[in-house]
Amino acid sequence: MTALSTFDSARICADFPILSREVRPGVPLIYLDSAATSQKPASVIEAMNDYYRRSNANIHRGVHALAEEATALYEGARERVARFINACSTKEVIFTRNATEAINLVAYSWGRANVNAGDAIVITEMEHHSNLVPWQMLAAEKGATLEVIPVTDDGELDLSTFDDILQKRPKLVCLTHMSNVLGTINPVTDIAAKAHAAGALVLVDGAQSVPHLPVDVQTLGADFLAFSGHKMCGPTGIGVLWARQALLEDMPPFLGGGDMIRRVYLREFKANALPHKFEAGTPAIAEGVGLGAAVDYLTGTGMAAVHAHERQIIAYALERLEEVPGVTVYGPKAERKGGVAAFSLAGVHPHDIAQVLDRDGIAVRAGHHCAMPLHDRYQLPATARASFYLYNTMGEVDALIEGLYKVKKMFG
C-alpha cells in the first residue's frame, strides 16, 4: 500500500504537538484511539490560548471591546461550522456540550412535544448508548415503543426489516452515520428517503462521520444531526446540533435561563430567536473558538483527502490484522467502513491486549465502547479497538501488528 501523493502524513503529524511526545523514556506515542477523542493541532490550542490572553469576556451582552471581540469569535465559529456541513443558515447550528447533549435536546424538546403513547421510535442495534438511552427514557415516559433495525453477521444494518417497521408509521428514525465499533458507514440518504415517505423524521448521530468524511446536511437527508467537537480536532466541552430551521422554530426551549430569552416577566417569558433559544447561560466560549479553529484546520486539509487517507489506512490495517492468528475483526470490508477496527484475539481479554500494547506506546481502546447491545449481538463481553485519523500512518499499523504478536507470545 502506498500513501496518497497529495497527503503528507509527516507534515500532518507535525501539526499535533502531543504526537511528538514519549509516553515513557524512549517509547514514542502511537495514538490509535481517535474514535474516543482526537488529538488537537497547534492552531486549535493557540486559538483558545489567544482568546483567554486577549479577548476573554462574556458574549452577547456587553458593548465594550472585549465583549464584542468575544462575541465575534464565538459567532464566527458558528459560521464556520455552518459552512463546514453546508447548513442553510447559522440559525440551524445549535452549540451544545457534546453530541450526547445534542441528542438529548431533541429527545426532551421535540420528543416530549411530539411523541405520544403508542407511537414508535426506530433505533438500530449498532447505536452508541448516547443514541439509545435518551429514546429509552422518552419511550418509558410517554408509553411509546422502540423498534429495532438489527445488525447482520457482517456488521451492516439488516434493512430487509425496515419496510415492515415503517408500516408502523414511526415518528422518528434514529441511527448512526458511522458505527464507533464496526466502522460501518450507513446509507443514511436512502434510509431517510424511506422514513420521510412513511411520515417519520430522521435523527443522525454524526459523531464518527463528521470528523472523517464530507457531510453535507442539504443532501444527507436527515432532519437532525448531532456531533462533537473533541472528535474532530477540537476541544472537549462543545458539540453541535444541526436541525432544519422550521423544526427548531416549533420546538420548545430545552433549558431555561439567561440568553435564551427575549423578554422575561414575573410569571412568563418569551423565548429568544434561533439559535440562542436553545443556548441558555454562558456558553463554552473558548471551546467554541477552538472548534472554529478545528474546522479551519480540517477545511484546509480537505475532508475528501482525509476520508481517502483513512480508507487506505483501514484497508491496510484489515489486511495486516488478518495475518495474525487468532484475530477476529468485526464489521464490513474496508470499502464499506471508516477508519475503525474492533477486534478480538483468541484467549486474551481485550483489556490485556490494550495494556500490553501500551508498553510500546500504542494507545488503543478496550471495552464495550458504549455499545453494550451491539456486543451482546456478537456475544462478546468487550473488544479491542484501533481507530485511525488523518495523522496516522501505515508504519503505525505495522507497529500495532508487531505489538499483537508480542501479546500472543506473552499469553501463549
Image (spheres, rainbow, N blue to C red):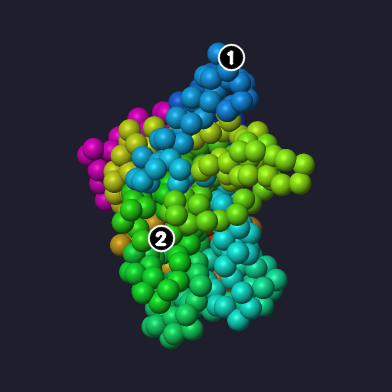
Do tag 2 and tag 1 residues touch (Cβ < 8 Å)? no
Count residues near mark 1 (Cα–Cα under 10 Å), then give few for <14, some for 14-19, many for 20+.
few
Q: Foreground mark, 2 or 1?
A: 1
- Going by the picture, which residue comes out furthest to the right? 266
Question: Does 134 sit left or right of 166 as displayed?
Answer: right
Residue 14: x and y in percent read 41, 28
Name the residue carrying label 1: 64
Residue 319: x and y in percent read 35, 60
Count residues near mark 2 (Cα–Cα under 10 Å), then give few for <14, some for 14-19, many for 20+.
many
Residue 328: x and y in percent read 47, 69
Quadrant that contains the C terminus:
bottom right
**Residue 119 lies in what quarter of the image?**
bottom right
Q: Nearer the viewer, residue 276 or 303?
A: 276
Question: Is residue 4 a member of the stretch shown in magenta?
Answer: yes
User: Residue visible at 29% across and 43% down?
Assistant: 305
Amino acid residing under circle 2? Ala
**How many dots with numbers?**
2
Res 347 visible: no
Question: Is residue 358 a member of the stretch shown in magenta?
Answer: no
Q: Nearer the viewer, residue 140 or 236?
A: 140
**Which region shows up in magenta?**
1-15
Name the residue carrying label 2: 222
